[in-house]
Each structure stands twice: as C-alpha cells, then as structure tokens.
Image (tube, rainbow, N blue to C red):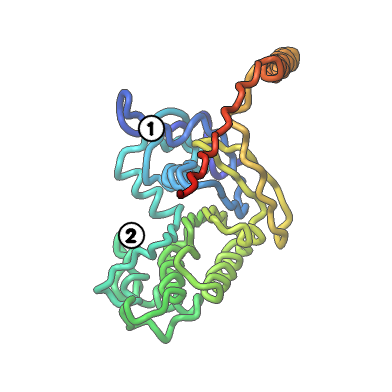
Amino acid sequence: MSVIKLQDVSKLYGFGDATTVALEDVELEIEKGEFVAIMGPSGSGKSTLLNIIGLLDRPTAGLYQLDGRSVEKLRPNARAKARRDKIGFVFQSFSLLPKLKVIDNVALPLAYKGRLLGRRLKMAHNMLERVGLADRAFYLPSQLSGGQVQRVAIARALINDPSIIIADEPTGNLDSSSSRLVMELLKEIHEMGNTVLMVTHNPELTRYASRVLYMYDGSIERDIQKRIGNIARKPKEPEFFAPDGSEEDTLQSVAATMTLSEEKEAAKKTKPKKQRKTKRTPKKRVKK
C-alpha cells in the first residue's frame, strides 16, 4: 500500500480574475522507503505539493491519503497530531529558534508530545550524537556554521522518529562541503527505511534519489525511476505553445506561408525602380 496517495489534487489561491492555480489535478503515489527528488522551475508548484503532503496546507479539491487514511478534511488537532507523529521537516531557512540552545531546539517537538524534561534532553543529546554535533549541544544557533545548523534541523526533524522526511531545498544556503554532509545524512536516513521527499534545483543531488519528479505549471510532467548513484538528466521543457490541429492543417499553413512569401518576392521584382536624382556639381567661378 502506498504511504502517500494523491488523486486529482488541485490548489487554487485568490478569487475571481485574481485566481492562481498552484496545483492542477495532480496524481501521485509514493511507496514506503522511496527517496523522491522533486525538480522544476520557480512557481511550478513544488513547495505547494510538499506543503499539502506535509499537512501544512489543504488542497482545494481532490483526495489525499496518508498511510491509507484520508487526511485532507481532518480537524486541526488531528492534522497536527498526524504531522507530529508521521512527518519530519527540513527547511532551507533552518527555522531554529535563535534564543534556544541547540539541545533545546532539538528537544522542542518532544515537549508537544508531553515527554518529561529529563527524557527530552537525553533523547535530544542522542540525536545530536547521531548527526555528529553532541559537542555543540549548548551552543546557540548563531554560533554554528550553516552546515551545522542544517544538521541540527535534521536532528530536530528525526526526534519523533517520523516515517516521512520532507526536505525543501535542504542545501540551498550551504556551500558544497556542507551540502555533501547534509545529503549523506539524508542518505543514511533513507537507508534506515524512511521515505524522503526532497525539493531541489541542483541536478547533482538527484544521484541520492530513486525517483525524480519534474513539475511544470502545477502539474507533474515527468515521473522517472532511476538507480541511486546516477544523476537524472533534465528533460526539455514541454512546448506549451505548440500549434493545435492535424498534420494536414500544419502542412496547409506552411504552404500558404510559402505562397505568400513568393508573391511578395515577385511583387518586389516587377515594381519599377525610382530613378535617383543626380546631384549637379556647382561650377567654380574664375576670379578676374
């Protein structure tokens, strides 16, 4: 059974003439344990798709099943519980609380689950050891590098042992060395059986994915299965403005254009040329 299943999911923003279609009739099934990379130009609907899958937003139309349960119409408390227990988020902007120490940031989701303080701190410390940052437990986020902060964000995302990890441009603000560390960490999470969904603009990062979705104008235009380790080739963007009609209509249109061009050329040849006026050179006056 699919862990994520979307049927005819659409998302609209605004009203009347100001309506924007963010997603249009999206069909998607993701099996447990897949690593899915989502690519596409800005405004193609990638983040909107993740927000709906992550229960941060509701679809305007369509059905969404999470672990076989319809969730698009859940009440706020039930949505928050499902989001807390099943999904971990990693954002490009890190989203850590700047005035809390690293260990408190990681432990924060456990507070919403009702765990006692001592238990929360122990679990958070173990998670920081897992991402290689136990020695930074009592630092503030501002005292860490960008790569370290993102690893803290991953530790926080994993603290409730979710089955799904959603990463929206997790390496967007990092240098190449930090990006590699973060991606290797996501790779380890995937190898442990977690389902990973990642939005990225970097084709190099598709080597970590087992499947790549390409989005254009709110729709999934390509869905490619691939071997982990290979970089997916970016397909050409669809020709949205290609002329409609049959092949015969196209040939007739080309023939008419060629005929018109020939007539214009013939008209140019038969048109009499205007005679150019020659300029008279003034005679020089001889001084007496």
Q: Nearer the viewer, residue 52 or 16?
A: 16
Position of the N terminus, as image quadrant, is: top right
Left or right, 28 with respect to 118, comes to right
Q: Given the image, on which type of amino acid does mark 2 rest?
A: Lys
Give the CA distance from mark 1 to mark 2: 37 Å
> Which picture quadrant has residue 214?
top right
Residue that protrudes farthest toward the bottom in the picture = 135
Residue 145 can be seen in this image: yes
Mark 1 or mark 2, earlier in chain: 1
Badge 2 crowding class, 10 Å Cα cut-off, few under 14, some 14 to 19, many 20 or more, is few
Q: Where does label 2 land, which residue?
A: 113
Residue that protrudes farthest toward the front in the picture = 288
Residue 250 can be seen in this image: no
> Which picture quadrant has residue 235?
top right
4 up-or-down from 181: above or below: above
Q: Position of residue 57 (x, y in %)?
A: 37, 42
Q: Position of residue 280 (x, y in %)?
A: 54, 34
Q: Position of residue 60 (x, y in %)?
A: 39, 30
> Which picture quadrant has residue 272?
top right
Residue for point 46% across, 29% down: 62
Q: Given the image, on which type of amino acid does mark 1 rest?
A: Thr
4 up-or-down from 155: above or below: above
Residue for point 57% across, 28% down: 277
Q: Where does label 1 land, which residue?
A: 20
Q: Nearer the viewer, residue 170 or 276?
A: 276
Labelled disc at residue 108: none
